[in-house]
Image (tube, rainbow, N blue to C red):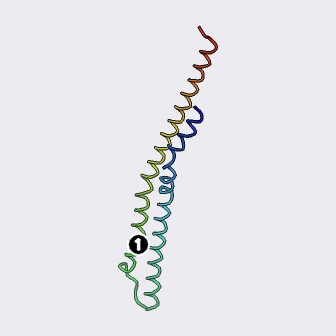
Amino acid sequence: MEEAGLLEVPKLESRLSGLSTIAHITPLLGLLGTVMGMFSCFHTIQLKTAALSPVTVGDLAGGIGEALLTTAAGLIVAIPAFLIYNYSIARVNHMVMNMERAALESVNFLCHITENPD
């Protein structure tokens, strides 16, 4: 019974590592996009200042929009991925606990039968 459990648990957890990776990486990718958007804004400010041109809100809107869009996209992917991952882990843990309980009950039943062969 223990061997069967050791074989089945990895099958239950096999795809969860990929989901965990997605849940952890997407906020970082959103943050990277935010940094790149802000870099774009500062680069625009640098170019405008070097050319002695005034910096307008329109000049910065593209970089700020990029920063906000990538942050939102990272969170839109990460939040459901975290929820699904945590739900899945809880289900796997519940199944493992039920398997262990059933194995223990089976062993106790078999021991009881061998002790009391009525």
Looking at the picture, tell me which residue is in the foreground, 93 or 69: 93
Residue 104: image quadrant is top right
**Amino acid at the residue labelled 1:** Ile
Give percent across and percent down for residue 77: 42, 57
Give percent across and percent down for residue 26: 47, 60
34 relative to 23, above or below: below
Residue at label 1? 64
Looking at the picture, tell me which residue is in the foreground, 15 or 73: 15
Residue at the location (47% across, 53% down)?
A: 19
Give percent across and percent down for residue 96: 53, 36
72 relative to 118, above or below: below
The furthest residue to the right: 115
Say which element carries label 1.
helix
48 relative to 8, above or below: below
- The quarter of the image holding the C terminus is top right
Give percent across and percent down for residue 74: 43, 61
Looking at the picture, tell me which residue is in the foreground, 41 or 23: 23
Residue at the location (41% across, 72% down)?
A: 64
